[in-house]
């Protein structure tokens, strides 16, 4: 027994002496401290997002409280904005925000999706596709204030005769019932559609590119033409991505400030005509916030709160829609 | 009977061809605006482009024939964007590291992801309103109202979500083998992240950050009532607490003036701003390609 135990001890101790340098060594406290500290730092910075977001909501809501108590929901449906008599209603701006963003979507969706189809199909050599792709990306990089500058000096003077003839021949339609005499809603819609075009195009291009090629091959194999394939196979397969991009663009269009402020005319009087000056929530804030005081600031904050809720709503619907519509293929 | 022949005049061939033509027209229509805008800004803005506009100050609108230069606005754009980057990069990278490396599937992580998405959709003018309400009107920063720092903070609010997203996505691209390997040889989590995963995701993260900075440089809406504008040079550290000029606000203010000289200066400023932003964009693309 003793001998066996002695051998056992010998066997166990000799390698043990060598192994000790490889054995698990607990970390020195300093290393542990750094590790835990770094993790907490990461958590703290991540929480900054939540803090910033909540304080944005809190500050805007607190600023709006006075006006909310005074006008209530009435604020949303009256178009009387009068700093002299201290009467505020944001209907013109809310209507303008929704109208300009939806109308610009109607222009930008066909253009953007059409372009995306054109540069994902094999109509032209790859190099031209890349060049068009870079063009679209560069358009996205142009600051909105520069687009506004261009809209004031080039686009609006160019459009004016066209818009005026629209009024002349189709003036019986309420939307064209005034003449165009400068800044107005119609040029604002056009410049907005130029701004959101790159978003729709690049997201539609990405989702069309992600479709497995076997879907296309199968469609061609059963005798579908190219455009049958595009309309009946490729677009339905990419619809979730495209819908997400469209809603993202809608959110962007609603919050877009500078280009719209410079070209929409900033009129607080409600006018149904697209050719007359109008207003959006963002442009109203940009235009008046600097000089406002008292209950005008509060009313502008209320309008900002409405804008924030609208864009939050669109954003949530976008995320839900993308999840809901994604096809499993 | 040979069924496999192509009839160019059949209804479906004609529909096919005309739809292709239609797509071509749409593509041309959507690339034209960029060409028009670039051509206009380059031709008109290049007209009175000379070296002296970088060294002189803008002049307040008046009857003068000259509108001065944009020297302080170029400097101001760099200062304000720099402040924004100094705030947004650490917060953004930290948040991205948390989302990609530490987060479990808990409610907190979901909330941070959701919050990042929401923050990236907050309209830029709201960031301006928020900073005005939280910092400018309350005079929190040593009693100053409109200041370069307030402008930088409002721009950083727009940058943070994009930095978080690029860091998160860049780290997700790093192969999990690297992470497990590093942890397996006994590196701590801190060492793994700082020495292994972050360096190997450096390229996409750096690209995303640089593009985010270039986008912030062109933002106007958050600056018009946080950084305001100034007709003077900003000198010394005290000037960070004073209103500061920036290219984008200069363009906005001067484009709406009724004077020709101011309008032309706005166009020149637009040319410089576009040159800076597109320059950064194109340089990043070229450098990325060279590294590959």
Image (cartoon, rainbow, N blue to C red):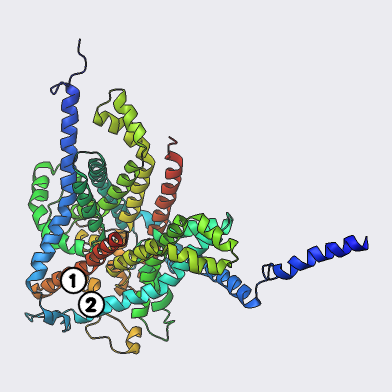
- In the rendered image of this protein, does residue A323 appear above or below residue A21? above
Q: Which quadrant holds residue A228?
A: top left
Measured as percent of width and height from the top left, residue A195 is found at 25, 55
First in sequence: mark 2 vs mark 1: 2
Q: Which residue does the numbered mark 2 point to in the structure image?
A: B74
Q: Quadrant of the N terminus of chain A?
A: bottom right
3D distance between C-alphas at marks 2 and 1: 8 Å
Relative vertical location of residue A192 with respect to residue B98 in this rendering, above or below: above
Give the labeled residue for mark 1. B272
In the rendered view, would you say B7 is above or below B99? Answer: above
Q: Where is residue B136 drawn, in percent x and y? A: 38, 78
Labelled disc at residue A208? none
Residue, far top: B1
Secondary structure under badge 2?
helix
- Chain under disc 1: B
| B256 or A328, nearer to the observer | A328
Circles 2 and 1 in contact, beta carbons < 8 Å: yes
**Residue A45 seen by the camera:** yes
Q: Quadrant of the C terminus of chain A?
A: top left
Q: Position of residue B10 (x, y in %)?
A: 16, 21
**Residue A254 sits in quarter:** bottom left
- Secondary structure state at the residue bearing disc 1: helix
Q: Nearer the viewer, residue A172 or B161?
A: B161
Tell me which residue sits at (46%, 59%) in the image.
Answer: B171
Q: Is residue A55 visible?
A: no
């Amino acid at each position: 027994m003793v001998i066996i135990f002695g051998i056992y001890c010998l066997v166990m101790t000799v390698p043990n002496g060598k192994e000790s340098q490889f054995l698990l060594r607990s970390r020195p406290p300093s290393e542990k401290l750094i590790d835990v500290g770094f993790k907490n730092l990461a958590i703290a910075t991540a929480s900054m997002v939540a803090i910033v977001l909540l304080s944005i909501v809190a500050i805007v809501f607190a600023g709006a409280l006075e006006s909310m108590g005074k006008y209530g929901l009435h604020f949303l449906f009256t178009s009387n904005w009068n700093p002299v008599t201290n009467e505020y209603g944001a209907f013109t701006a809310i209507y303008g925000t929704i109208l300009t963003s939806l109308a610009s979507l109607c222009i930008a969706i066909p253009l953007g999706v059409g372009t995306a189809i054109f540069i994902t199909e094999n109509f032209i050599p790859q190099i031209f596709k890349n060049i068009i792709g870079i063009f679209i990306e560069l358009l996205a990089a142009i600051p909105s204030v520069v687009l506004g500058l261009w809209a004031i000096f080039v686009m609006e003077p160019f459009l004016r005769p066209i818009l005026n003839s629209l009024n002349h021949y189709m003036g019986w339609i309420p939307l064209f019932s005034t003449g165009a005499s400068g800044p107005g809603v119609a040029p604002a819609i056009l410049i907005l559609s130029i701004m959101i075009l790159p978003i729709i195009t690049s997201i539609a291009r990405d989702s069309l590119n992600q479709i497995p090629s076997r879907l296309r091959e199968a469609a061609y194999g059963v005798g579908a033409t190219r455009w049958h394939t595009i309309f009946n196979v490729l677009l339905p397969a990419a619809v979730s991505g495209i819908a997400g991009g469209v809603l993202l663009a809608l959110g962007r269009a609603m919050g877009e400030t500078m280009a719209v402020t410079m070209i929409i005319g900033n009129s607080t009087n409600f006018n149904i005509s697209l050719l007359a000056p109008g207003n959006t929530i963002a442009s109203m804030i940009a235009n008046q916030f600097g000089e406002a005081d008292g209950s005008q600031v509060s009313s502008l904050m209320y309008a900002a709160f409405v804008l924030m809720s609208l864009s939050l709503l669109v954003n949530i619907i976008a995320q839900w829609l993308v999840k809901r519509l994604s096809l499993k293929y | 009977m040979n069924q496999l022949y192509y009839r160019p005049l059949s209804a479906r061939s004609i529909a096919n061809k005309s739809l292709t033509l239609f797509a071509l027209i749409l593509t041309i229509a959507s690339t034209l605006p960029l060409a028009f805008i670039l051509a206009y800004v380059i031709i008109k803005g290049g007209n009175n482009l000379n070296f002296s506009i970088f060294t002189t100050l803008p002049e307040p609108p008046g009857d003068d024939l000259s509108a001065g230069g944009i020297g302080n606005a170029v400097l101001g754009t760099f200062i304000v964007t720099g402040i924004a980057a100094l705030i947004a990069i650490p917060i953004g990278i930290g948040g991205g590291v948390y989302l990609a490396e530490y987060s479990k599937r808990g409610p907190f992580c979901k909330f941070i992801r959701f919050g990042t998405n929401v923050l990236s959709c907050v309209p830029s003018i709201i960031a301006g309103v928020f900073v005005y309400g939280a910092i400018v009107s309350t005079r929190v920063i040593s009693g100053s109202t409109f200041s370069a720092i307030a402008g930088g903070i409002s721009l950083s609010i727009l940058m943070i979500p994009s930095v978080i997203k690029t860091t998160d996505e860049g780290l997700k691209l790093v192969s999990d083998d690297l992470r497990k390997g590093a942890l397996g040889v006994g590196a701590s989590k801190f060492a793994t992240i700082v020495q292994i995963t972050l360096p190997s995701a450096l390229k996409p993260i750096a690209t995303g950050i640089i593009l985010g900075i270039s986008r912030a440089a062109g933002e106007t809406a958050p600056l018009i009532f946080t950084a305001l504008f100034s007709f003077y040079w900003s000198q010394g550290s005290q000037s960070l607490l004073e209103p500061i000029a920036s290219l984008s606000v200069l363009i906005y203010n001067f484009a709406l003036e009724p004077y020709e000289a101011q309008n032309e200066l706005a166009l020149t400023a637009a040319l410089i701003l576009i040159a800076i932003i597109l320059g950064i964009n194109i340089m990043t693309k070229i450098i990325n390609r060279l590294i590959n």
